[in-house]
Each structure stands twice: as C-alpha cells, then as structure tokens.
Image: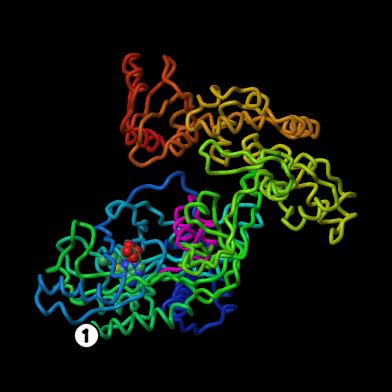
Amino acid sequence: MTEGMAELSARAATLREELERANYEYYVLDRPEISDAEYDRKFRELVELERAHPELRTPDSPTQRIGAPPQGVLAKHTHLVSMLSLGNAFDDDELREWTDRMARIAGDSARGDYTAELKIDGAAVSLTYEDGVFVVGATRGNGTVGEIITPNLRTIRDVPLRLRTNRPPRRIEVRGEVYFPFDAFEHLNAQRASAGESLFANPRNAAAGSLRQLDPSITAARGLRFYGFAAAVPDGERMPFATQWELLDALVEWGVPVDPNRIHATTLDEVVGFVRQVESQLRPSLNFAIDGVVVKVNAFSLQDELGVVGGREPRWAVARKFAPDIAVTRLLDIQVNVGRTGALNPFAVLEPVEIGGATVKLATLHNEDLVTTKDLRVGDWVQVKRAGEVIPQIIAPVPDRRDGSERKWRMPRKCPACGTAVERDEDGVAVYCPNVACPGRRLEGLVHFTSRGAMDIRGLSYARIEQLVAANLVTDVADIFALTVDDLVSLERFAEKSAENLIAAIEDARTRPFSRLLNGLGIRHVGAGAAQLLARHFGSLDALASATEADILSVHGIGEATAHAVVAYFQNPTTRELVKKLRKRGVLLEEPRARVTSGALAGKTVVITGTLPSLSRQQASELVEANGGRVAGSVSRNTDFLVAGDAAGSKLDKARSLGVEVIDEAELLRRIRDSA
Ligand code: IVH
C-alpha cells in the first residue's frame, strides 16, 4: 500500500468509528454528542472516500446501510433456536396464577427475581451476528423458519452492523422488535392517502409490511426503529451471562438498543406496580405502540428448569396485556361515502371523545352488516376502541342507556352522490354504486388512476386533481390526456414551468403498459395483481373488453367475482365511451410482450401447479418470467416442465400421461441459481 493510500485507509477507519460511535450515542444511549450537521458532514466525507476508492469500503461501513439492489423473492432462514410466543395474563390475578403455576414445578424459588419489560407492538425479528458482524436478519415466520430480510434490516439505523465488543460469541442471534413510531406512521399514511394508495390499519402492520419489501430503498424511507430484548446461541453453547437482566445490559454495551423502561423486581408486587405505572403514565407519552408488559423469570437456570409448553410458549415468561383503550360516547349519525370502485362505506359520526390521548370524532363501520350485527342505532351510546389501531372502531352499543329516541339505520337505496340505485355484491355484504361516472367516486378514482402503482403521473397531487375537477377541465380519466399547458396556467397557483412538467409527465404516462391502465381504471376486484394477470393473458384492452366470463375465469388466479365485475364494467355504455376517448387521445391499450429472452429458462414453457413450499404462485411465475421462461396455464405437449407443489391435481396427472418432466420448487430454484 502506498503511503497516501495508507493515510486514506486510516481516515476511512476513523470516520467509520466516529459515525458508529455517534449512532450508538444517538440510538442506544439516547445521548447524542455531535450535531446532525456534523454527522452528515462526516458521513458525506466517508461516502466520497469510498466512492473514489471502492477498495476501502467494508461491509459493515455505516454507508452500506442503503443501496442494496431489490431482491427477487425472500429466501428462508432457520432460526438457531425457535422464536417463541407468549402466554397472556389479562389482569393481576392471572399474573399471580402464572407464578403459582411456576411454583408448583420449581418451588418457591420461582416466586421472586423477575424482569419486567415493555411489550413492544411491532414485528419480531432475529439478527444473526457472526464474530460480531451482522450477517443475516430474518422475520419470525412460523417461529422455526422465517424470511431473510437482511438488506431491509441494514437500513434501520439502530440495528448495529457490528457489535461493540472484543469477545463476541462466535454466533449469536439477537431477537427484538422492529416498530413503527407513531409520527412516522402517520406521515406514511398521509403520503399514501395523497397518492391514492391503501392505508395501513396500524403501525404493527405497517412495520411488518415495510420489512418484507423486496426493495430495501422502500424500507429505508419508512423510518422504522428497533429494540432488542433477547438472544440465542447455538444448542450446547452457553450464553456468557446467567440472567435476563445481565443480558439486557450486555445488549446495550454491545450497541443493541434496549428500551430503558424496564425493571429488575424481586417481588410480584413490584411488577404489579410497574404495570400500573406503565399503563397509566408511560404508555400515553410514548411515540410507539405497546400492548403490555412482558414479565420474565430472571435466572436462565430457572428458565431452563421451567421449560417450554408445547414447543411454543415458555412457562417462564408471560405477557401482562393492557385493557384496550375504550371510551363511551354518542353515535350522532351514520353517513356513507363512495369509494373509488363505487363501494358505499358507512362510517360513524361521534360526539368527540378523548381516547388514549387523541380526540376521536369518526369511526369506521365497514359495511351494513356490521351495523346490523352490532345493532347500532343512531343516537346510541357506544363503546369506542382505539387500541393500537389508529382507525377507531365501535365495539358495541350500551343498550341500557337507550331512551327510545334512537333510530335504526339502513343503507340508502340510492347513491348519496349521484342518486343511482345501488347494487349489492354477489356476497351480499358490499353495496355499491354501479354508475361508472358517479361524481362521488370520480375524485378518488382520478387520484387512484394517477397513483404510483397505476399510471404514475408525477405532479398530479390530490389538490391539483380537485382543482382540475372544479374547473371542469377533467371529468373522467381520459380528459387528463387532453390537458394543455394553456389549460393549466389558467388555473391558480400553476406556474408555466410546473405546467410544462406536468404535461410532460402526462405524455410519459400515455405509453404505460396496459396492466397499469387497467389497475388505474378502478374496476371492482381488479387491483395491481389481477390487472397484471389479465393484461398478460389478454394482451390488449380490446381483447379483454370482448372476453366472456368463462374466458376470464380461465386465467389462473382470477376468480368469479373478478370475472363478473370485469364483464359488467366493459358492458357499461359509459365505459365504452371512455375507451373511445382513451384511444382517441393516444393512450396505449396494449401490454408490451415480456422482454426477457435470455436466462436460465429462455425459451422454456413452464406450468406451475399445487402449493409450493415457499413461493406464492405469483412469485413463482414472476421468477420464471424474469429468467426468460413463459408460464402457461395448462399442460400440453409443448410444456417443457411442470413445477408441482403439494396437492397438485389434474395437471400433474396430465403431465405424467404426456411424459412431461415434473420438478419441485427446490429444483426450479436450483436450475435458476446454477446458471446464474
Ligand atoms: S420475549 C419468551 N420481550 O411479543 C420469549 N417479547 O407475544 C418471547 N415482544 O414474539 C419474546 N416485546 O415479538 C419478549 N420485551 C419483550 C417483547 C416481546 C415485544 C413480542 C415478541 C414476541 C411476542 C410474543
């Protein structure tokens, strides 16, 4: 190494150390000692250095948290030791019963010496460190086998890429919870709402969904956090500590953040006091969801003696769950809004009430059935819950408080937005407005049409769409393609430059594949997945529009409700007009043929049947296509091979009778891997 190079290498090492230290102070100790600006400066210097001299880059460099390429599918990881779940105790008596059960097995020594920690309501993960370096991160999965999400976990800044210890165990799995802070969660849902995307019901779902993204840059943008609470070493090896309390301290020393709100208790009364204080005082002030306190026997030797019930729940730990946050208030009215597919969704208007620190005025009611089943009447006193779920729900009315003035409610027979007679879904539960041009669904429909998963027209925000509709420039999705720069600059707050940009974005969207357009149209039951299957099968809008229900049903993965909805949609005269307009405005109505022609499966026709052990049907099809193969719906002499999973039926028989090769998922993956 030249002298100059040695100097640069030393500088990179110093920067890495300083950045790691800053991360540790910030995320684990919660005591930052350098400013954000200084952190950024050092970070940029290191990025520059590594860019100019890639040989200086190390896998555990703080710069390596982002930038991993998207994965195809998530691979599996077998946990070193099973990830257990927990039994529940819903009150203090049940907590005492738990200690009684333990005492019957291990005697009175089980009646003292506990730890009590917050039960964080997120997604459980395991982080494998080999010689102190983070090598594999996985979801809990079924407790034995999880999915590998290492690149995603690397993007979470409080997951240490290297443990801060001179003598780390050779191999250790750190277990903990990835969670979504409330503020980041609300920000994400606000963004999704304005992009016309579906909302996450609660931070837990959002955390789990974000972790399983195939593209780590999406995970990185979400602001996830992590707390550790357990660890496992290979069977036969011993943890270098004797108690849970020592383990938690060691995790902190190693750079793994552990929630500071925890106690080491010698009596159950102390635990009971801690639970009360967490529930009444701490919980409302936290920026993340917890759903209880986990109480554990402190000594590992006693944990071993007590063991695990049914291979799933340890006897030595219990989740003391909180009562859900409930309030009682008046149900003032039940109103209905029209969604983008025309579905009529009732919601409750409540007398404003405080629950868990937030004022609740509205609650979702989902559908008419729910109102009937719960016998909700306008004017009722109702119990409202907001437990972790961000969207409040009505649990039940309080019939004792009725005075006879309450009114039963029925779904309106006419659409509240356009007056068209409503129709009922085949399953009888959903009620919808069949008018494709209903102004109630227009706005949401336009927003969906322009969203990222559909036509992806940047710069057409919710507010702008509202503006265009109000100015009568846009009444249906086809009108978007007739807009001109002059139209736009005539509107308020539209500068010439942004008008030009928007017109360019619209121009760009004209040639999106038909599958995107189809998703954007907002046909009932046709989301991104179904749109892709249909577009690939039929190849063009014209072919799909003239297909019968039977034709559509023959597409693998498409069910009756979808087939019915598609045919009904294209029979509607308003749809026919819309299609004409789209064609006239030069919108692409065809699906380009798959471009991948090289790869392990180039030129092969593959049929997939049965339940595969790890891949969904869709994932398997995508994998085959990404490697140059073609997926067909039925076995014929032209089939190169059949990939068969569990419960494969007639296709397997047919393949055997025709002498077509039959392989399993493992073999498929092997063929793809071996040629890569
Ligand atoms: S201990 C016995 N400690 O709760 C070991 N779990 O319902 C089980 N959880 O899957 C885990 N906070 O994901 C433990 N402080 C904590 C926890 C915690 C949240 C989750 C964990 C587990 C689930 C069990």
Instruction: Determine the residue positioned at 37% across, 47% down.
Output: 75
Q: Nearer the viewer, residue 265 or 622?
A: 265
Ligand 1 within 8 A of label 1's CB?
A: no
Question: Is residue 310 left or right of 330 when viewed as pictured?
Answer: left
Measuring from the top left, give residue 300's x and y in whole percent.
Answer: 18, 73
Q: Nearer the viewer, residue 631 or 196?
A: 196
Measuring from the top left, give residue 84's x and y in whole percent.
Answer: 26, 61
Identify the residue position indicated by label 1 in the image. 266
Measuring from the top left, give residue 635's x and y in whole percent.
Answer: 41, 19
**Dot 1 crowding, Cα within 10 Å, few <14, some 14–19, many 20+:** some
Q: Is residue 639 above or below residue 13?
A: above
**Residue 202 lies in the magenta-colored region:** yes
- Helix, strand or loop at label 1? It is loop
- In the rendered image, the residue lying farthest to the front is 404
**Residue 183 lies in the magenta-colored region:** no
Instruction: Determine the residue positioned at 75% across, 42% down.
Output: 477
Q: Quadrant of the C terminus?
A: top left
Q: Is residue 413 above or below residue 68?
A: above
Question: The residue under label 1 is which amino acid type?
Answer: Thr
Question: Is residue 247 left or right of 68 when viewed as pictured?
Answer: left
Figure quadrant, ligand 1 = bottom left
Q: Nearer the viewer, residue 492 or 158?
A: 492
Q: Quadrant of residue 257?
A: bottom left
Q: Is residue 2 visible?
A: no
Measuring from the top left, give residue 228's x and y in whole percent.
Answer: 35, 70
Q: Quadrant of the N terminus?
A: bottom left
Q: Nearer the viewer, residue 569 or 61?
A: 569
Q: Which residues are magenta?
A: 200-226
Question: Is residue 196 left or right of 301 when viewed as pictured?
Answer: right
